[in-house]
Image: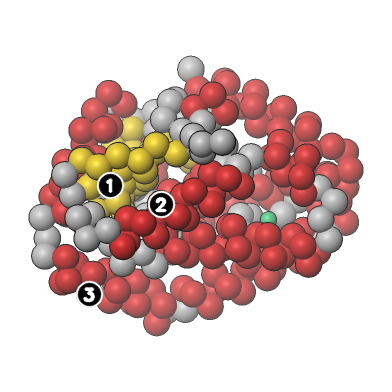
Amino acid sequence: MQDTSLIIENQGAVRRIWLNRAGAANAQTRQMLIALDEAIADATKDESVRVIVLAGKGKHFSSGHDLKEAQEKRSDFTAQERWRYEEFHYLDYCLNIWDCPKPVVAQVQGACVAGGFMLANMADLIVAADDAWFWDSVMFSMGLAATEVLFQPWVMGLRHAKEFLFTGERITADEAYRIGMVNRVVARDMLDDATMTVAERIAQAPPFAMRALKKSLNRTYDIQGFRNAVLAHFDTHQVTHASSEFAEIRDKGMSKVIEHNKTDLEKAGE
Ligand code: ZN
């Protein structure tokens, strides 16, 4: 069966990769993550592509990992099975975007939550619609130490990251802009155009110099410990998956969390 979880388009030198599960707030299934990783690799190889845009069809950028699928297919995973699964599909796939030699711009509207928030932040730039909101509820709703990739201190500063994660409260696009986490905030109906304007400008840069520059900028974070901190957190996140707190929430039924998230999305999606 043809995979429809992504739509891939070329606009000049810009490769647009759309998450295409609008009916499910672009919840990320395993199939979508595999397709996305392949799409990033394809765009990297294709010499006609200078910039990659990551976007989501519909009202929301992404509500995160598809918890319904996780509950059905992975709730009985052993610690080692979960470790392998999350290392491959969540950690490695995210770092493949972070490490992509071409510039990546995220285009974000509506909900940008948990795994969706993690995905958007692997991009180099974020252009947000004024209706975008960002939320990492994973500690409160699932008893886990945040998402698998702990990028927050690096993109919003340590003190904001602590407040954001310790309170589990959402932030608006304007707040995200104020703390330096997103580059631009535009009206919802201008989001496509505004993102393409930035992407097309970046696409005019000489590609080899751009590649070298992105490498140097990312290495600036690596020298400060980005990669080791992210890898260490992944292990810590796995420990919390093995905790009694997580088990309690899982035993109570992840469906409650899913239902709760759904209600929240519907409330916030209007
Ligand atoms: Zn996890």
Which residue type carries mark 2? Answer: Ala
Q: Earlier in the sequence, mark 2 or mark 3?
A: 2
Q: Earlier in the sequence, mark 3 or mark 1?
A: 1
- Mark 3 near ligand 1 (CB under 8 Å)? no
Residue under label 2: 39
In the displayed structure image, the side of residue 242 where residue 98 appears, left or right: left
In this view, 150 is above or below 228: above
Residue under label 1: 15
Single out the mark in the foreground, 3 or 1.
1
Q: Earlier in the sequence, mark 1 or mark 2?
A: 1
Residue under label 3: 212
Q: Residues within 10 Å of mark 1 (few under 14, many from 20)?
A: many
In this view, 21 is above or below 116: above
Residue at horizontal 11 percent and vertical 65 percent from the top: 206
Q: CA distance from mark 3 to mark 1?
A: 20 Å
In this view, 223 is above or below 24: below
Q: CA distance from mark 1 to mark 2?
A: 9 Å
Q: Secondary structure at mark 3?
A: helix
Residue 178 visible: no
- Mark 2 near ligand 1 (CB under 8 Å)? no
Q: In the rendered structure, are the residues bearing label 1 and label 2 in contact, judged by CB atoms less than 8 Å apart?
A: yes
In the displayed structure image, the side of residue 264 where residue 119 appears, left or right: left
Residue at horizontal 78 percent and vertical 40 percent from the top: 72
| Quadrant of picture, ligand 1 | bottom right
Which residue type carries mark 3? Answer: Ala
